[in-house]
Image (cartoon, rainbow, N blue to C red):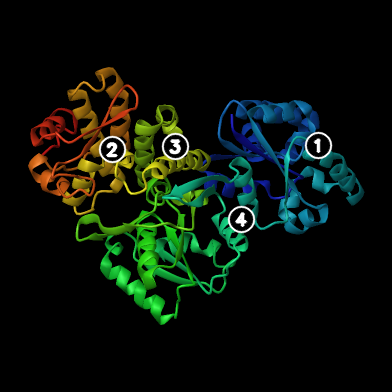
Amino acid sequence: MDNIYLTGFMGCGKSTLGKVLAEHLRRHFVDMDAMLVKTIGMPIDQFFQLHGEKAFRQREYDLLKRLAQHDRLVVATGGGVPCNAANRELMLASGHIVFLDMPLASIRDRLSAAEIAVRPKWQTDDGELQKLFASRRPHYRRDSIAIDGELPLADKVAIIQRKLFPPKQCPVNLNGVTHTLTATFTPEIALQQWLAARTEAYSRIVFLCDYRCADLHAERFRPRFPHALFISVQPGETSKSLRRAEAIYKQLLAANIGRDALLVALGGGVVTDLGAFVAATYKRGIDCVLVSTTLLGCVDASIGGKAAVNVGDWKNQVGLFTRPQAVLLDCGSFWTLPGTAIRDGLVEAYKTGIVLDRDFMIWIEEQLPILLSGDSVLLAHTAFQSAFLKAAVVKEDFLERGLRKVLNLGHTYGHAVETWNHCRVSHGRCVAAGLLAALAISQQRQLVSAAWAAPRRALLNALIGQPFALPNAEQAWPIMANDKKNRGRKVLFVLMTEAAPGYAFVNDVSPADLDQALAEQLFPDKHK
């Protein structure tokens, strides 16, 4: 059980906070008082007059008991709920209690006359109200996470998010040079702290983001970095090009940005790829920090020191290995992601689990419905664990000469699908198609059993959603022949194995093998 129960004196803003918190966590919000009014069929003050407080508290307990049977709720409780020990037991057994600590005078100031009129306890004289407030406060504080109720709403949300998912860190070693990867709901604070801890000062800070990200997330950074330069590009793969990089170079030059500046790439995989490429090549290199705001970027693009741009429809064909100074996974942005973006990120995380950690793979399978609902805390765990696993591989093979190629599982055919569709089908769905093709070939070669393959195939099809047009082997092969990981003019495939280590590298897959996999296993009715 992982419910969040908001407590505090009547009128302190539990319902207001609860609605926003639930939106940011992608969870269901329940206002106990509003639900009780529906259940009893009359306003609470009227019920008090007719039946008394004891009857109301019993109704309150009964409702709380029902809510405690559910999971992942954000519940705004009534003012008297925590004063009952049985109520506190229910809340502690099923989640976290958060107390909005606020002076009585401040609560009074935020209430209108109409709001006071529907709260029976507020209609007593001031002395009685002060006595009630003083008697309840120790109950509110007991067994709870206390936060300042007078803070701005966004700050209260951020504090609770950090309590549910404290910042997690791991070192990322890129060919002997180490930086820190941090998964956090407040990357703006983490970036400020990172800068404060560095001995050298940067002459300027430049944020690169796309217009969508600027609208959604840049405002969290602007107050903390008031003198920073913000450069925005159009969202989407078309911005990841040499032409766009040149336009950014010109903007940096026009602003007199020198080599002692810091570029912060704030956005999804397109922006972090483009930003790292620009930073590594502008004036022969300036420092760069990546702040990834999409699940796909957090589990894949921001990890490992690769930077690249596209050439036409050919993905990531011009680039280099580089080293960011730090990587921040912005879990506070997950609530803004559409379902398609969550699915894309889960495909890459699932791929990582298949080849590197079968327990993580199974965990994703078990948690899939909740993950697809967009629960921000579970997505944060997914992002960090996937990044942590990928970082361990990158440490062993930064230049992708051996082990790191395992992360190409699903990408050989997947990139061909993406290119063939002119990037009009999302990266995650294309990789999922590539994973299904690899799974089918693995089963053909008896590397995995039908029983092992079945649940994996079902999950991947669920992540893909609606079928889409796929290239056959003849159409895909010329694209796959240009894959960066190929050697000796042979197409490298990563296949799955049921036994350890969980993967196999092969370069003898034929076009006929691929066509058989497509015809028998992968969208047979849609295959062209």
* Foreground disc of the pair 2, 4: 2
Name the spot of residue 433 as percent of width and height, x first. 24, 38
- Asked which secondary structure carries label 1, the reply is helix
- Asked which secondary structure carries label 3, the reply is helix
Tell me the tag on residue 409: 2
User: Badges 3 and 2: C-beta atoms under 8 Å apart?
Assistant: no
Name the spot of residue 428 as percent of width and height, x first. 31, 44
Place residue 274 in its image quadrant: bottom left
Name the spot of residue 21 as percent of width and height, x first. 58, 47
Per the image, the residue denoted by label 1 is 139
* Foreground disc of the pair 3, 1: 3
Per the image, the residue denoted by label 3 is 371
Of residues 301 and 11, the one nearer the viewer is 301
Sequence-wise, the earlier of marks 2 and 1 is 1
Residue at image position (23%, 52%) is 424
Residue at image position (30%, 21%) is 452
Q: Where the N terminus falls, by quadrant? A: top right
The amino acid at mark 4 is Ala
Give the CA distance from mark 3 to mark 1: 35 Å
Report crowding for label 2: few under 14, some 14 to 19, many 20 or more residues within 10 A (C-alpha). many
